[in-house]
Image (cartoon, helix red, strand yellow):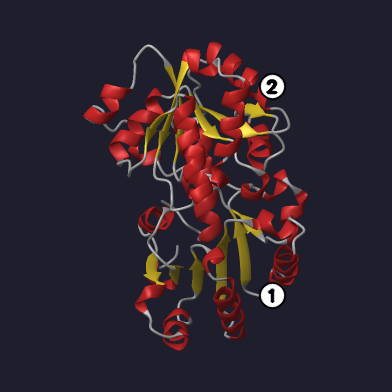
Amino acid sequence: MFSRNEIMMVFYSQSGHRAGHAELFGQYITIDFRDNYESFWALFYSWVRPKTLIFGMIDDSYIEFVCIALLRALFLRKTRGLFFRPQQCFQHKFVGNIKLVLFFFLRLVPFTFVTILLPTDINKRLRYVATDYIYDPEFWHLLDRKGESRVALSAEFEARLPSEKKIILVCGAIETHKGILFLLQVLRAFPQILDVANIVIAGRTANHLQSIDIRQKLISEGCLSFDSFIDDSDLAILYERASLVWCAYPPEYDQASGVFGTAIQNNRKVIIRGGSLLESFCLRENLGPVVLDFSSARRSGEVIYEALENSAPLVYDESKIRAWRAWSWTTLVPGFKE
């Protein structure tokens, strides 16, 4: 059994999913934030002491992760980093090549672990940059919330959601890297989708001109838009009401997804891009997604329409999700028992 004080997980901010991850992992291990330190050396003095140090997201600062991992290795102390975007190492750009070389050699450093958020066996290239893997925390973070009572949707949602239509939910950060341009192309190529379903766009769009423009065009095509912070209660009910959840992301955003994981835990079918890591994961776990061919917007529209016509609630194996959680905890904390 481990001592809580032997392991520390560190984050560079509390924005986005980081706050949720800090709360989840903080149930059993110590959490610290980069903002607590004014200088690198003050930070290092505090972060060198734990027997195991885990970076909650090394993508926030590759340089500090590498420096601290190498320094801690001299003291025979373990350092682990959660690597959210390993596919960027294989995108054949100058920066990608640098990352590939960096992580290829870093994984050979004693006491240093690079951990990705999807199984390495779904794509053999991942083993070049990772030592091991966990399952994205948002693939299993709702397990202990099963059976929680849901209050009614807020009045704004209830008033604008016709109950006779099915729902395709597009949520999270509504930006180009979440595939909204292809969604627009699909609707223009096959508008019949909107005859049988509401496409609900729920979430904020950052101050990014292309994303804002595409969102406005989606609204013009007939999508329902809620451009604001969506509280957990409303979001949970939207997942429950959705027939399909949009997770069809372009190649430059080929990674694990919290939206995908939340949909899976809510027994919702997910829409994904063919050839993506998420498709490989679904095949591995037999999750039955709706798979789109990004080379044909019309054919993708037909696939979505057929899925809506034949959609039925899926019941995913909860024991499988519990196994994902158990694997993740024991990878991060050897000897861990809940």
Q: How far from the left and from the top, in percent, is residue 215?
A: 47, 38
Q: Quadrant of residue 1?
A: bottom left
Left or right of residue 323, residue 288 in this image: right
Three-letter amino acid code at disc 1?
A: Val
Mark closest to the chain's N terminus, 2 or 1: 1
| Label 2: few (<14), some (14–19) or many (≥20) C-alpha neighbours in 10 Å | some
Query: Is 240 rendered above or below residue 97?
Result: above
Labelled disc at residue 109: 1
- Residue in the picture at 68% in, 40% down: 276
Q: How far from the left and from the top, in percent, is residue 303?
A: 64, 20
Left or right of residue 115, residue 19 in this image: left
Three-letter amino acid code at disc 2?
A: Arg
Query: Is 1 rendered above or below residue 300?
Result: below
**Nearest to the observer: residue 242 or residue 149:** 242
- Residue in the picture at 61% in, 19% down: 190
- Say which element carries label 1: loop
**Nearest to the observer: residue 217 or residue 289:** 217
**Nearest to the observer: residue 263 or residue 146:** 263
**Nearest to the observer: residue 58 or residue 131:** 58
